[in-house]
Image (tube, rainbow, N blue to C red):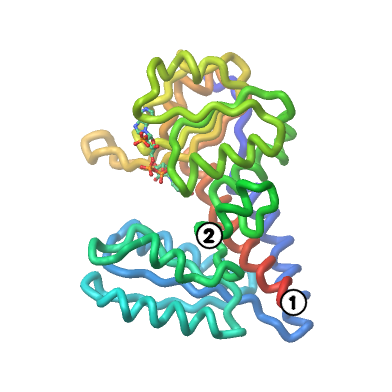
Amino acid sequence: MTTANIIDGNALSTSVREQLAERAAALKAKGVTPCLAVILVGEDPASAVYVRNKVNACEKAGLRSLKDVYAADVDPAVVMARIAELNADPGVHGILVQLPLPKQFDSDAVLEAIAPAKDVDGFHAENVGALMQGTPRFIPCTPYGVMKMLETAQVPLKGAEAVIVGRSNIVGKPMAMLLLAAGCTVTICHSRTRDLAFHTRRADILVAAVGKARMITGDMIKPGATVIDVGINRLPAEQGGKLCGDVDFASASQVAGLITPVPGGVGPMTITMLLTNTIEAAERCV
Ligand code: NDP
C-alpha cells in the first residue's frame, strides 16, 4: 500500500503549460511568435521520441518549431553551419541539439557553438557559469522542472539535507547548484561514493539521477523524505518492457513522504521547462 503522497508531473505540467500558452499568445499579439529550433542527428529511437514530444509540445502551447534531421554519418561541419544560421535568425529564439551525438562529433564544441542567448537547454559554458554564480540566464530543463515540483509541493528547502545521486552536467551538477542556492546542504553522490545508503538515508530531499533501474530502495530512504526520481529506464522484455525510474517505487513509497512517479513525474516537467526557457528567450527580445 502506498503511503507517500505523489507529486504529479503530468498535472503540474498541464497547469504550467496553460500559463505558457497565455504568454505565447501575449507575445504573438506583439508580433513575436516564440520559436524553438531542434536538431536531431542519427536514428536513435529514444532521441527521435524525445524530439517528437518536444515539437508536439511546442505546437500545443502556441510556439513555432523548426526541426532539422540529419543522417548519423553527416559531416559535423554541416550541422555547425546550420547552428550558425539559426544563431543569426532573429525569428528563432531557442536552439536545441538533441544529445547524444554520433562519434564523429565533438559534443562540447557543438554546444558551445549555440549562441548563449538562444541556449534554452542551458548547457553552454557561459550559461553554466552564470548558474554557478547564482545569476542564471537559462536553467537546464530537468533540474528546473524538479525545482518547480519542489516549490509547488511546498517542500521546505532552507537548511534541508539534499542528496543527489548522479553528477552529470545535464542533471546532477546543475541540480546541486539550484538546491544549494535555495539553502539546502547538498551532497552529491556518484559511482565512486562509498556506502551510498549512508548518504541517501540522511536526505530530507533525495534526487536520483543515475540511469539504473530501481536501484534506490525503501531501506535507503529516510522516513518522510521527498524523493525525486529523474531516471528513465526501460525494463527488459522479460520484465514487461515498461519504463521505470532509478527508485524502486513499491518499497520507496512505503517510506517517503512525497515521491515522483515514473512515468508521469520529472519527464513531462523537463519538456515544460524547455517551453518556459524558449518563451523567456522570446520575451527578452521584445
Ligand atoms: P549519466 O549517465 O550522465 O550520469 C549518471 C550518474 O550516475 C553518473 O554521475 C554516475 O557516476 C552515477 N552512477 C552510476 N552508477 C552509480 C552507482 N551505482 N551509484 C551511484 N552513482 C552512480 O546520466 P544522466 O544524468 O544523463 O541521466 C540519469 C538518468 O536520468 C537516466 O536514466 C536518464 O535517462 C534520466 N534522464 C531523465 C530526464 C527526464 O526528463 N526525466 C532527463 C535527463 C536524464 P560517475 O559520474 O562516477 O560515472
Pick whichever, 22 or 157, lies toward us: 157
Report how many numbered discs are placed on residues in the image.
2
Q: Is residue 81 left or right of residue 272?
A: left
Residue 250: assigned label: none
Q: Quadrant of ligand 1?
A: top left
> In which quadrant of the rendered view does residue 63 lie?
bottom right
Q: Residues within 10 Å of mark 1 (few under 14, many from 20)?
A: some
Element type at mark 1: helix
Residue at 70 percent across and 54 percent down: it is 15
- Dot 2 crowding, Cα within 10 Å, few <14, some 14–19, many 20+: many
**Image quarter (top left, top right, bottom left or bottom right) of the C terminus:** bottom right
Single out the mark in the foreground, 2 or 1. 2
Q: Give the image location of residue 26, x and y in percent.
A: 78, 75
Q: Is mark 1 within 8 Å of ligand 1?
A: no
Residue 191 point in image, percent of width and height: 35, 29
> In the rendered structure, which disc, 2 or 1, sits on the residue that comes first in sequence?
1
**Residue drawn at (26%, 63%) of the image:** 102
Kindly identify the residue that appears in the image at 50 percent across and 75 percent down: 37
Residue 151's place in the image compared with 84, above or below, is above
- 112 shown above or below 84: above
Q: What is the secondary structure assignment of the residue under circle 2? A: loop
Give amino acid for label 1.
Leu
Reading the image, the residue beneath label 2 is 121
* Residue assigned mark 1: 27
Horizontal relation, residue 221 to residue 282: left or right? left
Q: Nearer the viewer, residue 254 or 214?
A: 214
Residue 49, image x and y in percent? Answer: 38, 61
